[in-house]
């Protein structure tokens, strides 16, 4: 896909984004060898679901029934399970020179989830914007919470430790020792995870792998995330989700180096089907799933 100085490459295997370039500078991590995507454990640019992030105990209850899921991280379900959406082959159609649409029918019982769901992911390039529209239409109530799992580099081959991150967030989810949200909320104020003003990722003395709740009173026309490279390339992310998982990439698997890219993954709250106080991720035939993520690349370090 191309539009002016912007181009992107996507794959029908897992609805992956293989590459995203602006003025021939690559802004995400990707494999040149397509075979590596079949064994990829880092979800490098994948579409993740049915439910992104972690579901505690690999189970949830809905309408009086308990659904047992595929446990692929200890006793929990991570990124939809071992056979989640990122492991499936999607039907890919290029609908315009700057747009691709991918579709996949997830059958009832797949990875333990209930309901037949028709998923659709569209990726559109409109220089300097890249927009993902993620949709799901189910024939019965079921949890859906997708995310796009790019590792952003902003053209840096030396990693992202020096990149500055700013989030429209003053709270993050409390997690247990397995990274599963417990239902508690923590304030970022005066903490190591305070990104209310720009702060370099490398100055945080701990690996970042947390879900940040976006400020509900924020101006919806403002970005939820700003990411700036030392080269002054600037990424602004606009999302309609309640928050985003931010992963600094500290524990990336070989052949990749730690912190060679950083994930910013807007989605519903992790473990939401098991935490009644979290915003619901249950979708129905009358209330289908829709999630839009828009990414803007600019030069100069301050956005548009």
Image (spheres, rainbow, N blue to C red):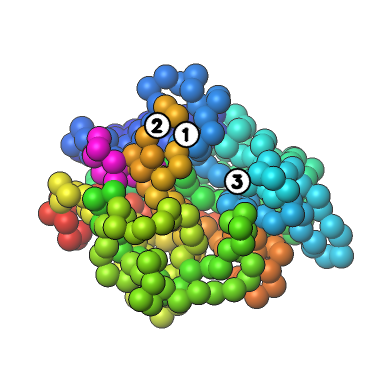
For disc 3, the marked residue is 79
- Of 139 and 213, nearer the camera is 213
Quick one: 145 or 129, which is closer to the camera? 145
Q: Nearer the viewer, residue 271 or 108?
A: 271
Q: Is residue 154 magenta-colored?
A: yes
At 62% across and 54% down in the image, what residue appears?
178
Residue 91 falls in which quadrant of the image?
top right
* For marks 3 and 1 on the same chain, the one whose residue lies earlier in the sequence: 3
Measured in 3D between alpha carbons, the distance from the residue under mark 2 to the one under mark 1, in whole angstroms, is 6 Å
Position in image of residue 73 (x %, y %): 66, 44
Which secondary structure lies at badge 3? loop
Q: Is residue 285 above or below residue 88?
A: below
Q: Residue furthest right?
A: 64
Q: Is residue 221 left or right of residue 284?
A: left
Around disc 1, counting alpha carbons within 10 Å, would you say few (fewer than 14), some (14 to 19), or many (20 or more)?
few
Q: Can you tell which mark lies on residue 9?
A: none
149 to the left or right of 112: left
- What segment carries the magenta color? 151-160
Q: CA distance from mark 3 to mark 1?
A: 17 Å
Q: Which residue is mark 2?
A: 256
* Secondary structure state at the residue bearing disc 2: loop
Q: Are marks 2 and 1 in contact (CB under 8 Å)?
A: yes
Residue 39's place in the image compared with 298, above or below, is above
Q: Which mark is residue 253?
A: 1
Q: Is residue 40 visible?
A: yes
Q: Alpha-carbon neighbours of circle 3 within 10 Å: few (<14), some, or many (≥20)?
A: many
């Amino acid at each position: 896909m191309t539009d002016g100085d912007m181009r992107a490459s996507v794959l029908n295997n897992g609805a992956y984004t293989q590459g995203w370039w602006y003025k021939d500078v690559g802004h995400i991590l990707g494999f040149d060898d397509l075979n590596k995507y079949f064994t990829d454990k880092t979800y490098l640019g994948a579409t993740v679901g049915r439910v992104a992030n972690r579901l505690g105990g690999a189970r949830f209850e809905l309408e009086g029934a308990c659904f047992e899921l595929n446990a692929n991280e200890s006793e929990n379900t991570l990124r939809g399970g071992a056979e989640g959406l990122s492991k499936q082959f999607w039907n890919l159609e290029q609908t315009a020179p700057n747009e691709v649409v991918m579709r996949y029918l997830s059958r009832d019982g797949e990875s333990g989830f209930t309901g037949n769901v028709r998923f659709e992911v569209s990726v559109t390039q409109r220089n300097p914007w890249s927009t993902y529209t993620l949709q799901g239409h189910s024939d019965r109530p079921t949890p859906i919470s997708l995310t796009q799992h790019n590792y952003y580099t902003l053209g840096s081959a030396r990693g992202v430790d020096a990149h500055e991150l700013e989030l429209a967030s003053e709270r993050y989810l409390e997690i247990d020792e397995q990274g599963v949200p417990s239902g508690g909320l923590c304030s970022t104020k005066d903490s190591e995870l305070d990104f209310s003003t720009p702060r370099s990722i490398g100055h945080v003395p701990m690996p970042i792998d947390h879900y940040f709740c976006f400020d509900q009173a924020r101006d919806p026309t403002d970005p939820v995330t700003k990411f700036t490279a030392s080269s002054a390339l600037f990424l602004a992310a606009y999302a309609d989700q309640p928050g985003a998982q931010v992963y600094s990439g500290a524990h990336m698997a070989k052949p990749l180096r730690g912190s060679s890219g950083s994930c910013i993954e807007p989605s519903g709250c992790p473990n939401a089907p098991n935490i009644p106080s979290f915003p619901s991720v249950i979708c129905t035939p009358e209330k289908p799933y829709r999630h839009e993520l828009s990414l803007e690349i600019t030069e100069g370090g301050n956005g548009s």
